[in-house]
Image (cartoon, rainbow, N blue to C red):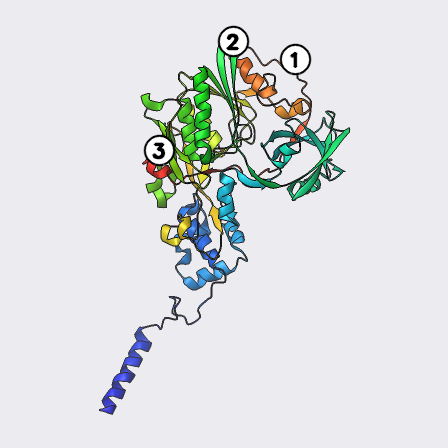
């Protein structure tokens, strides 16, 4: 009996050795399991493989990349950090995707809550000289800059007592990003020292509805003017109230100042379009979102809405409101700059099939794509923050869709050229407050309503050159999806 049992064991062993491979736990059966050094790298690759707009065009995001676990782990281990891996996976045409170190802070930033000095400067090279100055475009209410008396139009020619020149300005600007800095103000010539002010960064909750104004007699018309600096869903009700004010005033023309509006919520952009135009007599599509081939079920058409959702700063839906829609607006003036991007450009592109849209200022950024936040939550296809790993706060904000208008147009990746070119920076020594009828860009729009060419007798333009590259907020040119967008557009 013992011989029979022994023979059976030997035969079973030989059969196993010949026909089966002992699995070592990694699915490859080679007996040499590779250990993954950083699990966040696995999340990074898999989320990008699922959602990235250019997934099919990036060789290292091929679906077969993770078929062999050992070689896949070896590939992931070749990157010291998930940020490094993420950067390697970006397509050459992608200028806007980014890796998130702390998604909680990022969500606050989307609602205008971030740590900063609270003012937005623009860099200029003065009249063909080596002198560089920054003039202040905007100051956030109750920010450190506001409390210290910084004003739109103020001129700063140095930081921490180092005067900026063409040779050193990039080094000097490193102090702009520090916790505390001393700013050296100058007179209108950009040279003569005026005063110094030291401020420290603090948390700033910036209301994007900066100014609402009505001009009562512009060629016999009432003109509404609003300075809107960010499509932040937690301010939907304030935006709606602003349009209620303009509607109550009976405005017949609208000037929308988006010069420092880098974008934000796609849904809020659709709400704003609905405040300007009634799409009831059309096929009601304001914008269409198209995803990659893995997520065509997410493709959606945003209509012109009759009501809007109200959100708090945490992104929670707290109710609805009927939209305050202006009546009879057949033309929209958009004041724009190179900082006008994404959801702002979505307004221009989305409304053009229905009303005349005139861009006044300079060329826009050119961002016809949008993103969603991806978390380390594989059970939800990486879209649910509540089920994300508790081991880290890393996330990603990759481009995952492209925006089209009612006519299927999405050809503004190089930006929208202005219908009326006005270069604000060439009048850097005479920057007037927002809403001043003689402020150079606003004046051009009002003059066009009057039916006359831009009159600038009281404004001196010079040969100054705008200097690009000063990012006020990291990744500020964003367009993203709110939680309720899909169910409202399906």
Query: Is 293 above or below relative to 454?
Result: below
> How many numbered markers are drawn?
3
Question: To which residue does mark 2 refer?
Answer: 219
How far apart marks 1 and 2 lie (CA) works out to 19 Å
Residue 457 badge: 1
Residue contact between numbered discs 1 and 3, judged by CB atoms under 8 Å: no
Residue 288 badge: none
How far apart marks 1 and 3 lie (CA) works out to 46 Å
Q: Earlier in the sequence, mark 1 or mark 3?
A: 3
Say which quarter of the image contains residue 185. Answer: top right
Tell me if residue 210 can be seen. Answer: yes
Give the percent coordinates (x, y) of residue 380: 37, 50
- Residue at image point 55% right, 13% down: 447
Name the secondary structure under disc 3: strand
Crowding near the residue tagged with mark 1, few <14, some 14–19, many ≥20 C-alpha atoms within 10 Å: few
- Residue at image point 44% right, 68% down: 33
Say which quarter of the image contains residue 300. Answer: top left
Name the secondary structure under disc 1: loop
Name the secondary structure under disc 2: loop
Q: Earlier in the sequence, mark 3 or mark 2?
A: 2
Crowding near the residue tagged with mark 2, few <14, some 14–19, many ≥20 C-alpha atoms within 10 Å: few
Q: Quadrant for the C terminus, please.
A: top left
How far apart marks 3 and 2 lie (CA) works out to 38 Å
Give the percent coordinates (x, y) of residue 337: 56, 28
Residue 301 badge: 3
Tell me if residue 414 can be seen. Answer: no
Q: Quadrant for the N terminus, please.
A: bottom left
Query: Is 26 above or below relative to 256?
Result: below
Query: Is 285 above or below relative to 326?
Result: below
Q: Residue furthest top?
A: 220
> In the picture provided, is 122 more to the left or to the right than 207?
right
């Amino acid at each position: 009996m013992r011989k029979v049992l022994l023979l059976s064991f030997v035969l079973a062993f030989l059969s196993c050795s010949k026909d089966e491979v002992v699995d070592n736990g990694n699915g490859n059966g080679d007996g040499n399991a590779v250990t993954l050094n950083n699990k966040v790298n696995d999340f990074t690759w898999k989320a990008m493989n699922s959602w990235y707009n250019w997934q099919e065009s990036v060789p290292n995001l091929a679906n077969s990349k993770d078929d062999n676990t050992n070689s896949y782990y070896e590939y992931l281990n070749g990157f010291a950090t998930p940020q490094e891996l993420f950067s390697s996976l970006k397509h050459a045409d992608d200028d806007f995707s980014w890796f998130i170190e702390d998604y909680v802070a990022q969500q606050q930033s989307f609602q205008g809550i971030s740590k900063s000095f609270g003012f937005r400067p623009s860099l200029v090279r003065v009249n063909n000289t080596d002198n560089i100055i920054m003039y202040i475009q905007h100051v956030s209410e109750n920010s450190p800059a506001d409390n210290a008396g910084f004003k739109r139009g103020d001129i700063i020619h140095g930081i921490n007592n180092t005067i900026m020149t063409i040779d050193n300005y990039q080094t000097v600007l490193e102090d702009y990003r520090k916790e505390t800095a001393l700013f050296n103000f100058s007179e209108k010539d950009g040279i003569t020292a005026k005063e110094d002010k030291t401020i420290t960064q603090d948390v700033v909750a910036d209301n994007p509805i900066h100014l609402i104004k009505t001009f009562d007699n512009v060629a016999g018309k009432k003109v509404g003017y609003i300075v809107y600096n960010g499509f932040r869903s937690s301010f939907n009700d304030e935006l709606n109230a602003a349009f209620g004010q303009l509607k109550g005033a009976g405005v017949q023309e609208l000037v929308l100042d988006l010069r420092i509006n880098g974008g934000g919520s796609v849904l809020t952009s659709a709400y704003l379009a609905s405040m300007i135009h009634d799409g009831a007599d059309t096929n009601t599509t304001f914008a269409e979102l198209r995803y990659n081939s893995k997520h065509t079920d997410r493709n959606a058409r945003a209509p012109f809405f009759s009501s809007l959702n109200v959100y708090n700063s945490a992104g929670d839906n707290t109710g609805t409101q009927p939209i305050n829609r202006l009546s009879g607006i057949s033309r929209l003036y958009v004041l724009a700059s190179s900082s006008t991007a994404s959801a702002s450009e979505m307004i221009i592109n989305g409304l053009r099939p229905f009303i005349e849209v005139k861009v006044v200022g300079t060329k826009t950024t050119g961002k016809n794509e949008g993103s969603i936040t991806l978390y380390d939550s594989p059970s939800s296809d990486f879209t649910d923050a509540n089920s994300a790993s508790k081991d880290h706060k890393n996330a990603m904000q990759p481009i995952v869709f492209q925006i089209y208008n009612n006519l299927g147009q999405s050809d503004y990746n190089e930006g929208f050229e202005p219908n009326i070119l006005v270069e604000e920076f060439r009048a850097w020594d005479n920057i007037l407050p927002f809403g001043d009828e003689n402020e150079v860009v606003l004046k051009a729009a009002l003059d066009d309503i009057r039916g006359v060419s831009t009159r600038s007798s009281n404004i001196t333009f010079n040969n100054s050159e705008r200097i690009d590259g000063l990012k006020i907020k990291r990744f500020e040119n964003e367009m993203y999806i709110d939680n309720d967008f899909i169910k409202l557009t399906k």
